């Protein structure tokens, strides 16, 4: 059974603190609470096992320590039509044949202690104009959320202290997607087309990873298959491979 929830303290659900899926759900819960129509939370249960779902705009994330695949979940996805669904493989495996979706592979990388050698802090901005960041991301991520949705999400999370966006040399950006339980997820790494190949993304990532790991944080990121070679080449450690399903 899947039911919309509005009165559960998700931070008290221990299973949500154990992996990416749960921590991502917690990041939306902490940022928005349960009172927005564009960010809705659900409990999914088969009577023995319980999982949780967040549907945030075009993204759906499922977190469960056990397989919660069911015909009801398939119908739930078809009804809401998210652009992307992320879930542990035990559940996602049963969702791969939903019409209109394709499966994509991705690799999880963790930061290894590469010290930034050429990083110029004078060209680093910790509070850039979000319009400038969105312009860069549009070049690197053609399927990025519409401007208003992206701006709402990131400005809200930044105000709540859940996220940070960095700009380096005016052309390279990376985002702290969340920082929960000392686990930091980095995402939306991009460089303007005319500045690619100069090592700016590498230096920014080394700097972010070095600073955060020295602060006791565990730093990771995900890369879809067509981007994962870059992170291998610059020395990030591949720790797992996973899948998502995405609208065709």
Image: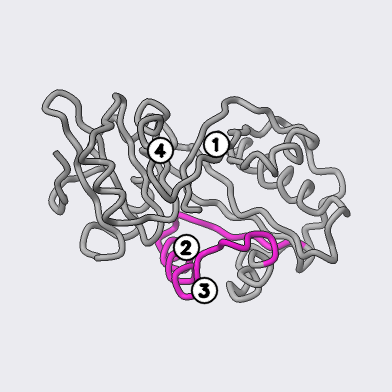
The magenta span reads 139-168
| Labels 1, 3: front one | 3
Residue at 55% of width from left, 36% of height from top? 217
Q: Mark number for residue 147?
A: 3
Q: Earlier in the sequence, mark 1 or mark 2?
A: 2
Q: Are marks 3 and 4 in contact (CB under 8 Å)?
A: no
In the image, residue 174 sits, relative to residue 62, either above or below, namely below
**Residue under pointer 4:** 97
Residue at 79% of width from left, 48% of height from top? 203
Q: Earlier in the sequence, mark 3 or mark 4?
A: 4
| Labels 4, 2: front one | 4
In the image, residue 50 sits, relative to residue 199, either above or below, namely above
Q: Earlier in the sequence, mark 1 or mark 3?
A: 3
**Residue under pointer 1:** 217
Q: What element carries label 3?
A: helix
Residue at 41% of width from left, 32% of height from top? 19
Give the percent coordinates (x, y) of residue 191: 75, 60
């Amino acid at each position: 059974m899947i039911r919309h929830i509005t009165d559960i303290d998700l931070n008290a659900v221990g299973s949500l603190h154990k992996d990416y899926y749960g921590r991502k759900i917690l990041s939306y819960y902490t940022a928005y609470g349960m009172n927005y129509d564009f960010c809705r939370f659900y409990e999914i249960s088969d009577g023995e096992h319980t999982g949780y779902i967040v549907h945030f705009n075009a993204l759906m994330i499922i977190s469960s320590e056990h397989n919660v695949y069911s015909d009801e979940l398939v119908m739930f996805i078809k009804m809401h039509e998210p652009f992307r669904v992320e879930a542990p493989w035990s559940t996602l495996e049963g969702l791969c044949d939903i019409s209109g979706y394709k499966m994509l592979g991705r690799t999880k990388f963790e930061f290894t202690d590469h010290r930034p050698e050429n990083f110029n802090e004078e060209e680093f901005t910790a509070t850039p104009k979000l319009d400038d960041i969105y312009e860069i991301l549009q070049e690197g991520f053609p399927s990025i959320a519409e401007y208003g949705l992206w701006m709402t999400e990131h400005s809200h999370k930044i105000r709540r202290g859940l996220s940070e966006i960095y700009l380096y040399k005016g052309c390279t950006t990376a985002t702290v997607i969340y920082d929960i339980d000392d686990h930091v997820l980095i995402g939306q790494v991009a460089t303007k087309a005319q500045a690619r190949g100069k090592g700016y993304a590498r230096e920014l990532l080394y700097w972010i990873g070095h600073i955060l790991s020295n602060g006791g944080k565990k730093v990771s990121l995900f890369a879809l298959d067509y981007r994962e070679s870059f992170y291998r080449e610059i020395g990030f450690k591949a720790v797992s491979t996973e899948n998502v399903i995405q609208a065709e």
